[in-house]
Amino acid sequence: MTTTSTPGSTTTSTAGEGPAAPRQEAGEGARRRRGTTVLVTAVLAVVTAYFLLPVYWVVVAATKSTQDLFGTNGFWFSARPQLLSNLGAVFTYDGGIFVRWLLNSLLYAGLGAVLATYFAAAAGYALAKYDFRGRGLVQALVLGGVLVPGTATALPLFLLFSQMGLANTYWGVLVPSLVSPFGVFLVQVYARATVPDSMVEAARLDGAGELRIFHVFALRALAPALVTVLLFQVVGIWNNYFLPLVMLADQRLYPVTLGLTAWRSQVDRLPEFYQLTTAGVLVSVVPLAIAMLVLQRYWRGGLTEGAVKD
């Protein structure tokens, strides 16, 4: 036992009690952190499995015949894999109509996403950096456009495009894909934070025109937001189903999603279309996976840019 005397008071403590309490608290804190880590890891593992299992099933199903698809374990390969045979049937059926659907999707998603991103960048930058009459109304309309689902506008667009003679053409799907209210809203918010007014004023004093300021300085500062908009547009247009269903009647203009649905509708009469559909689904996700792998590097780099200061 140790007795410590200080002016006005006397403190008595048992030898070793002082260091033991902090060590016990530190041990309990470490156990709580380990428990939290295990819980978070378990939740993330379940969520990851939830998202990846359908993809794994598609890979396995694409290697099977129709008989094996229903006669074997759905999550394991059959004894007679025939992936190459199924892919060959997909690309050669009906004179290679699947290749045309794939090219149509690349046209709709590729050209549509690039142009929609550029238009969103221009509109968002203008709303953020220019003060003009009616800007508040335009911002309210853009925000309202974000809240309106695309399926609600499909039928009015079909009626409008029918009067213009654009229904059942490439333009019927491509033109609506050029509008991205979410992209305009995102770029507007990002431009306010990353494009300083002083830089714009300095460029004007140096004699730069408004188009040059936008293309040379603003687009470079907005790159992370533009990559985000581009990625969302590519995925959204590629997976779009209802608008092409309403707008298109000619199968040669179908995107791959609509074409696969057309194949799926024939499986009751012709069971071999199960093989074509599952292998076609596998091929259809490859361009999206490539786009994600290519763009996510720029996406993550932009999001973390400036996160740490020296």
Image (cartoon, helix red, strand yellow):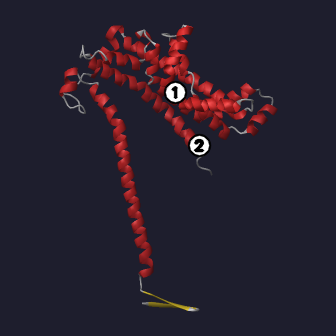
Q: Position of residue 198 (x, y in %)?
A: 76, 39
Q: Secondary structure at mark 1?
A: helix
- The residue sitting at 53% across, 29% down in the picture is 148
Displayed quadrant of residue 185: top right
259 relative to 135 in the view: left or right: left
Disc 2 designates what residue?
A: 305
Q: Position of residue 151 (x, y in %)?
A: 47, 24
**Residues under numbered marks 2 and 1 in contact, where contact means CB atoms less than 8 Å apart:** no
Q: Position of residue 186 (x, y in %)?
A: 59, 35
Q: Amino acid at mark 2?
A: Glu
Q: Amino acid at mark 1?
A: Gln
Q: Position of residue 41 (x, y in %)?
A: 37, 50
Displayed quadrant of residue 83: top left
274 relative to 228 in the view: left or right: left
Q: Is residue 237 above or below residue 103?
A: below
Measured in 3D between alpha carbons, the distance from the residue under mark 2 to the one under mark 1, in whole angstroms, is 23 Å
Residue 120 visible to the viewer: yes
Residue nearest the viewer, comparing 269 with 137: 137
Badge number at residue 219: none
Label 2 crowd bin: few (<14), some (14–19), many (20+), radius 10 Å: few
Q: Is residue 216 above or below residue 308?
A: above
Residue nearest the viewer, comparing 282 with 293: 282
Disc 1 designates what residue?
A: 233
